Amino acid sequence: MAVITEIPVDAQIRELAERRPFLSVCFDLIRRQPLGAAGALIVVIMIAAAVLADVIAPYDPVVIVYDRIHLAPNLENWLGTDQFGRDILSRIIYGARTALFVGFACAFVGATTGLVLGVASAYFGGYFDLLFQRVMDVFMAFPLIILALALVAIFGGKIENDLVLVIIAITIPFVPRCARVVRSSALAIREIPYVDAARALGYSHSRIILRHMAPNVMAPYLIMITAFVGQAILLEASLSYLGLGVQEPTPAWGLMLAGGAEEYAESAPWIAVFPGLAITLAVFGFNLLGDALRDVLDPKLRSQ
């Protein structure tokens, strides 16, 4: 008589997932998360523009052409020119590099630091957790832009590189926000028996935090990263608009707004409209992607 071996349900699901074509999986995700797919498309276009800026940009973004000042959008300059005759489309394309570099650098460093501190706070507990959370409360009491402005004022005279200064000023306010979210998830993980087993085996605190607890809070960590990228882009644009971010002639969307948003709002509105639209689409795209990622990674939302 033949012996029938029962295959575990998880193995069956894994086998079916491996058999499905990649395109089929992509179309299924697009059908389930159309807004997330739209956000991912915006992000992909933005990344492609930043990577291929040297190829697709029609003009040099920093070359001043005095005989082409304030040209309205035309066949040669699709988005017009600014008060220095520079092509706005080229500056927007190159500005994507500045926005993405600042966005990803601030989001990754801030979220990763918050991940480690949040898990450590939940793991040690007691007075360490109490004191750490009160320090985080102090940082979170200030709006992001206010805290970023204060950090620029503090470090402005000590850091000469304006891009590094902007990254530091934006990264630090992200740390307590990620640490608070990660800590809430890590508190439940701390009570799982395998953490006690790791302690009983004599593993160091750093190993338990980094290798046993941190990997189990990756879902909120990844969601926070996508949310932070959009916020970092907006904060960088705000600081540049106020004259505290990157400086000329570096192409940056906030700097483009500062250069002509108010003075030429009536005579040459395209100088402010198109950079503002680029900022809006970038933040909108990352927010949509973050919401979709949250729905996919959160098992409670996925089951509904």
Image (spheres, rainbow, N blue to C red):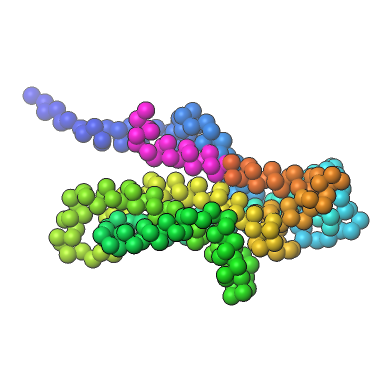
Quarter that holds the N terminus: top left
Seen in the picture, residue 45 relative to 54 is either above or below; the reply is above
Residue at 28% x, 50% y: name it.
187
Residue 124 lies left or right of residue 107; in this view the side is left
Residue 116 lies left or right of residue 72; in this view the side is left
Q: In the rendering, at what x and y percent does residue 108 appear?
A: 48, 57
Is 258 magenta? The answer is no
How many circles with numbers are drawn on the protein? Answer: 0
- Give the quarter of the image for residue 200: bottom left
Q: In the rendering, at what x and y percent does residue 134 appear?
A: 38, 59
Q: In the rendering, at what x and y percent does residue 283 appear?
A: 59, 45
Q: In the rendering, at what x and y percent does residue 147 appear?
A: 54, 59
Residue at 51% x, 36% y: name it.
36
Residue 112 lies left or right of residue 93; in this view the side is left
Q: Residue furthest right?
A: 67
Residue at 53% x, 42% y: name it.
287
The magenta stretch spans which residues?
A: 285-304
Q: Residue furthest top?
A: 1
Q: Nearer the viewer, residue 176 or 185?
A: 176
Specify the principal SS of the magenta part: helix
Seen in the picture, residue 270 relative to 30 is either above or below; the reply is below
Q: Is residue 103 visible?
A: no
Q: Nearer the viewer, residue 129 or 60?
A: 129
Seen in the picture, residue 290 relative to 107 is either above or below; the reply is above
- Give the quarter of the image for residue 125: bottom left
Q: Is residue 293 visible?
A: yes
